[in-house]
Amino acid sequence: MAAPLSADAFARALRAEGVRITEHTGWNTYNRNHKGPWGPVHGVMLHHTAGSSSVGFCRRGVPDLPGPLCIGVVAKDGTVHLVGYGRTNHAGNGSTAVLAAVRAERAVPSPGPDEADGNAPFYGFEIENLGDGRDPYPAAQLDAVERLSAALCRAHGWSGASVIGHKEWTRRKIDPSFSMDGMRGRIGRRLGGRPSGPSAPPTPAYAPFPGGAFFVPGHRDPLFTAVGKRLVAEGCGRYSVGPGPVWGAADRASYAAWQRRLGYRGADADGNPGRASWDRLRVPRV
């Protein structure tokens, strides 16, 4: 049982654990606290998005489930996109028996009736994945899930038993589509030592595909300038000014031209980068 970390303390804890974060505008004050309390907090709840490009969706939500739908979205490349902070529409109602187990830091039972509000006592995170059993979770993404969970457990003095999946909270859900026992094992081993900081992955010749969630209108990153320069070099630039570090309509139009160059048509040439077209563009690392 604990008061939630302040937004600044939360971000510091993630960075200390080696989590790479992208802070979206206003994330630290964007929440659903006007609908009920957030806290005391007892643990971390993990979800998968069931979509391939979900940062904007998780921030906005939909009319019958307004955003933010989580605190952060874990992209395929391991970047954690912070979209809100506080009470978020991520958990819904779930099992009082599961909540009691999390509070006691013991193994969670099978979920019972949906009687407890899960949006109040948990930090909620969405993990970019289709959830169909075929979409992979890259090593960098699982490493980020492990690190962010350990960061919060370390900050609050919790064990890995304080981290659960949405599928363990309620019988209505199946996410996340990986072993929670396996993830808790990873978190427990990490908590056995001091924060290690970022791992050092091998350096590829070109920038790896950062995941569909990376390409959100208004997102700023120097990689977008490199993408635009490659599109111009391939004769697909549709820029009147730029390219620059903020992903926008001209970048999308240029990328759509690249997709058409590769033979894609219709919805497959919508300007949203995919892994196959990205690999063929050969964007330099920045």
Image (cartoon, helix red, strand yellow):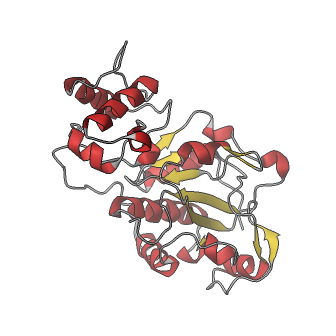
Residue 251 vs 87, above or below: the answer is above
Percent position of residue 186, x then y: 42, 74
Q: On the rendered structure, is 43 left or right of 73? A: right
Residue 228 vs 86, above or below: the answer is above
The total number of labels drawn is: 0
Percent position of residue 19, x then y: 43, 53
Q: On the rendered structure, is 247 left or right of 82? A: left
The quadrant in which residue 110 appears is: bottom right
Residue 83 in view, yes or no: no
Residue 248 vs 122, above or below: the answer is above
Residue 161 in view, yes or no: yes
Residue under the point 15% across and 45% down: 205
**Quick one: which residue is furthest to the left in this view?**
205
Percent position of residue 78, x then y: 40, 54
- Quadrant of the image for the C terminus? top left
Residue under the point 53% across and 74% down: 160
Percent position of residue 29, x then y: 68, 39
Q: Nearer the viewer, residue 45 or 7?
A: 45
Q: Nearer the viewer, residue 203 or 177?
A: 177
Q: Nearer the viewer, residue 86 or 190?
A: 86
- Quadrant of the image for the N terminus? bottom right
Q: On the rendered structure, is 155 left or right of 20? A: right
Q: On the rendered structure, is 201 left or right of 33? A: left
Residue under the point 78% across and 78% down: 96
The quadrant in which residue 238 appears is: top left
